[in-house]
Image (spheres, rainbow, N blue to C red):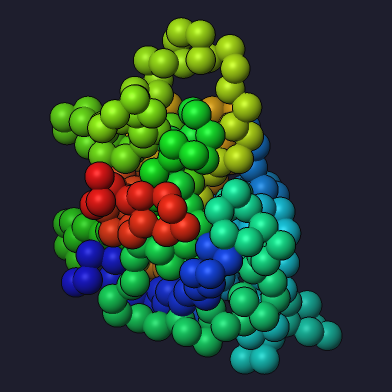
């Protein structure tokens, strides 16, 4: 196993990265189709095709998930993913065509690098061309290229973050994996100790401010940071119904709350997708267990996102502090 979401058979991951502009996108391909679910917890989301993932709606399977930088402009990258899939005759069959189902979520990275450059359809297409099974690049890649955390005092005192992935094998061959781009308003902490790994840097010296504690004081009245979001995907080879996939997406947000403090604020657009690549009757698992493990691997992936990140455009990463 690679400790990556690609440990789930049928998942491929590809990145498009622009380090100069500090933006990019990441595609999670499931070309044979996967039962999809989603849960949006943040107050400022930027998403595409999330309504169709609700249990009451017709379409059950998706063919890719796109995570992108570029704020709402970055949703355009999903067009390139659709083109890639259509060329391969992959999609929801409507008789006259096959329509690829590509839900997407974006994060705001326009305050670092070049705000005029955002992931577009060509970027999404190139991410698909780069998609592969096996090890997944982490840190300053794909949707995590321009990601930062700890924005209580604005971008000047933020820490560089990025993209991370993790997985666990449980029971009789069941695998649960996660991938996440961490662009949080809050701090990333070690769930075991509560120690801040990356967050708002102390303007008066070394170390980090405790964002949540400072929000309780006067700083909580002056927050203007509407520019954050943690977006990710959890996947499993266990069979889940559409209702169960939505429940797993919901439970995976517990991992966000474990590793980011505060999480799900009105300044974040936190969105987690869930994918089940299992076949009915095979590797059926307890949805509560899958959801609980999804939360664990999500927290692990968030920590890897900040630990694998590198300093960029003057914003230091945890490894350099």
Say whether residue 45 is left or right of residue 25. right
Q: Nearer the viewer, residue 299 or 58?
A: 299
Residue drawn 58% across the image and 22% down it: 223
Q: Which of the 4 quarters of the picture holds residue 48?
A: bottom right
Q: Is residue 29 above or below residue 61?
A: below
Q: Quadrant of the N terminus?
A: bottom left
Q: Is residue 78 above or below residue 225?
A: below
Say whether residue 192 is left or right of residue 286. left
Numbered-mark total: 0
Q: Is residue 20 above or below residue 271?
A: below
Q: Residue furthest top?
A: 217
Residue drawn 44% across the image and 40% down it: 158
Residue 311 visible within the image = yes
Residue drawn 19% across the image and 60% down it: 169
At which x and y percent is residue 316? 36, 49
Q: Which of the 4 quarters of the picture holds residue 63?
A: bottom right
At which x and y percent is residue 38? 55, 48
Say whether residue 62 is left or right of residue 251. right
Q: Residue furthest front?
A: 204
At which x and y percent is residue 311? 36, 56
Q: Which of the 4 quarters of the picture holds residue 240?
A: bottom left
Residue drawn 40% across the image and 24% down it: 211
Residue 163 visible within the image = no
At which x and y percent is residue 150? 43, 35
Say whether residue 77 is left or right of residue 186. right
Q: Quadrant of the C terminus?
A: top left
Q: Nearer the viewer, residue 194 or 253?
A: 194
């Amino acid at each position: 196993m690679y400790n990556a979401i690609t440990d789930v058979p049928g998942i491929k991951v590809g990145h498009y990265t622009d380090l100069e502009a500090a933006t990019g996108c990441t595609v999670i391909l499931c070309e044979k189709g996967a039962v999809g679910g989603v849960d949006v917890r943040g107050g400022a989301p930027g998403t595409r095709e999330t309504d169709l993932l609700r249990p009451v709606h017709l379409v059950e399977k998706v063919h890719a998930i796109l995570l992108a930088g570029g704020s709402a402009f970055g949703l355009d990258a999903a067009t390139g993913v659709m083109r890639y899939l259509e060329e391969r005759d992959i999609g929801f069959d409507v008789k006259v065509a096959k329509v690829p189902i590509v839900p997407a979520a974006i994060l705001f990275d326009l305050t670092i690098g070049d705000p005029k450059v955002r992931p577009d359809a060509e970027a999404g297409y190139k991410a698909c061309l780069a998609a592969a099974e096996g090890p997944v690049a982490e840190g300053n890649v794909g949707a995590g290229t321009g990601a930062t955390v700890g924005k209580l005092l604005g971008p000047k005192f933020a820490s560089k973050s990025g993209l991370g992935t993790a997985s666990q094998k449980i029971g009789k061959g069941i695998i649960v994996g996660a991938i996440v781009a961490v662009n949080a308003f809050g701090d990333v902490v070690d769930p075991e100790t509560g120690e801040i790994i990356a967050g708002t840097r102390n303007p008066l010296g070394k170390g980090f401010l405790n964002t949540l504690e400072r929000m309780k004081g006067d700083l909580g009245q002056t927050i203007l940071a509407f520019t954050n979001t943690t977006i990710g995907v959890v996947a499993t080879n266990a069979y889940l119904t559409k209702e169960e996939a939505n429940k797993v997406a919901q439970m995976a947000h517990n991992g966000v709350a474990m590793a980011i403090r505060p999480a799900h604020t009105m300044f974040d657009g936190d969105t987690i997708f869930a994918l089940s690549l299992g076949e009915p009757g095979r590797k059926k698992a307890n949805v509560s267990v899958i959801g609980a493990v999804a939360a664990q691997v999500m927290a692990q992936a968030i920590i890897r996102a900040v630990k694998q990140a590198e300093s960029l455009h003057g914003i230091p990463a945890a490894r350099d502090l």
